[in-house]
Amino acid sequence: MLNKQVLQALRADVNEALKAVAAKHGLGLELGNATFDPRAGTAKFAMLVAEPSASGATARRWSAAYPC
């Protein structure tokens, strides 16, 4: 059964898995909002392209190759 506590634990595991996939492909992957009921749920995630900014920090933006 899905509930808030189960989804919070699942989110932590999914975020860790997304870090490995993002590093492998040179992307930023973020898990977005999720909705659920006791039997099913949906979640969205964003794929971001990381670009260095003038200060050397990483600035993120949506990829021009995938306009919304």
Image (spheres, grey):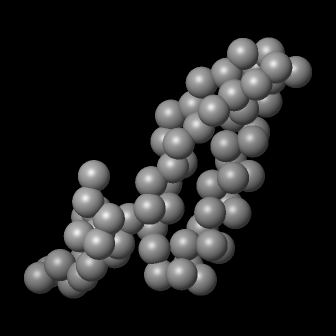
Q: Give the quadrant of the N terminus.
A: top right
The residue drawn where x is 75% and y is 42% is 10
Count of numbered tags = 0
Q: Position of residue 57 (x, y in %)?
A: 25, 77
Can the viewer see residue 60? no
> Furthest-left residue in view?
54
Q: Nearer the viewer, residue 62 or 6?
A: 62
Q: Is residue 21 visible?
A: yes
Left or right position of 62 against 9: left
Q: Position of residue 20 (x, y in %)?
A: 65, 73
Image check: 18 left or right of 5?
Answer: left
Q: Quadrant of residue 24?
A: bottom right
46 or 54, which lies in front?
46
At 27% from the left and 52% from the top, the residue drawn is 68
Residue 11 is drawn in which quadrant? top right
Relative side of 65 to 42, left or right? left
User: In the image shown, does 65 or 44 lie closer to the viewer?
Assistant: 65
| Residue 68 higher or lower than 28, as above or below | above
Q: Residue furthest top?
A: 38
Q: Please name the residue shown 76% across and 25% down the image.
A: 40
Relative to residue 28, is residue 39 depicted above or below? Answer: above
The relative height of residue 54 versus residue 63 in the rendered view (above or below) is below
Q: Where residue 33 appears, x then y in whole percent?
A: 50, 34
Q: Nearer the viewer, residue 9 or 47?
A: 47
Question: Residue 4 location, x and y as percent?
Answer: 70, 22
